[in-house]
Amino acid sequence: MPSDRRLRVVLLAAAVVLGAYQIWAVFFHETPAVSIQGYHRKSADEFGRGAIIAQAFHMEASGFAAADVQFSTDRPLNLLLRCDLTPIDEPNAERTAPAVTQFVTIKRVSGVEWRRLSFPGEEGSGLRWYLLRLELIGAALADDDSPMPVKPSTDRRDRVGVIVSIDNVYGGGAMWIDDRRQIGSLSLRAFSRWRTAFERFRIDVAPKLPRGLQSAVVEIALAVAYQLALLTVLYALLVGDAGRAMRR
């Protein structure tokens, strides 16, 4: 029947699109190793008034290289930040390791935007906890060529904040504002040196598999076979149910 044939074509096209998306997502798309973002969020404007925001998170992949943080401003601003990154054993453990400090200028932040902070010195590290501390050193209009203020003023007109959740997020670590523990977490996405999910699988998981499964060719073949089997089953179920319904 023509309608039955059209249905088969539509389902086949949907299966091809789904398969292509999964291939793109696993092998080509940059995906964070850690993503912390609650359902209920707000702007922590204390950050713009000089408060230090700290977030402990567990890096679930080797080679921590960068973190995305959501900043919030009322109009385009250039921000000067102090970023301290400290390896820790767990959120409540004593902080004995020295922090890696860097000063970062983020240009033209307007509204709520994700911006990336890079930490190239951590690329050789393994799976572990980190404490990220952010402090606003200065802020200036994006088109203003005058020197950036050395310290944010408590009576500044421009609002500067970071986006945080006001609900506890599973796997969300711990957050402090000026050394006071808070409910919720900083909105944060942590990236490994290996950008895609497949690259991280090859580094962190593949070496622990039986020798016969450690080959990238074998792993790709198994992934393709699994996807084909899944799509075949779904196609058979949908077309079979549709075909029986139309024959009735």
Image (spheres, helix red, strand yellow):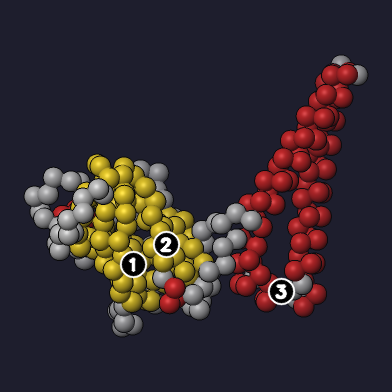
- Mark 2 or 3: in front is 2
The amino acid on which the numbered mark 2 sits, given as a three-letter code, is: Ala
Q: Circle 2 — which element? A: strand
Task: Compare residues 34 and 70 and report the one nearer the observer.
Answer: 70
Q: In the image, residue 46 lies at what x, y percent?
A: 19, 53
Which numbered dot is residue 132? 1
* Alpha carbon separation for disc pair 3 and 1: 33 Å
| Numbered label tally | 3
State the quadrant of the C terminus.
Answer: top right
| Residue indicated by mark 2 | 67
The amino acid on which the numbered mark 3 sits, given as a three-letter code, is: Leu
In this rendering, would 52 be left or right of 63? left
Which numbered dot is residue 92? none
Task: Compare residues 12 and 141 and report the one nearer the observer.
Answer: 141
**Would residue 184 be visible to someone looking at this image?**
no
Q: In the image, residue 140 lies at what x, y percent?
A: 20, 53
Question: Measuring 56% from the left and 63% from the top, which residue is drawn there?
Answer: 195
| Residue indicated by mark 3 | 209
The amino acid on which the numbered mark 1 sits, given as a three-letter code, is: Leu
Question: Measuring 45% from the left and 62% from the top, which residue is drawn there?
Answer: 190
Q: In the image, residue 175 lies at what x, y percent?
A: 30, 61
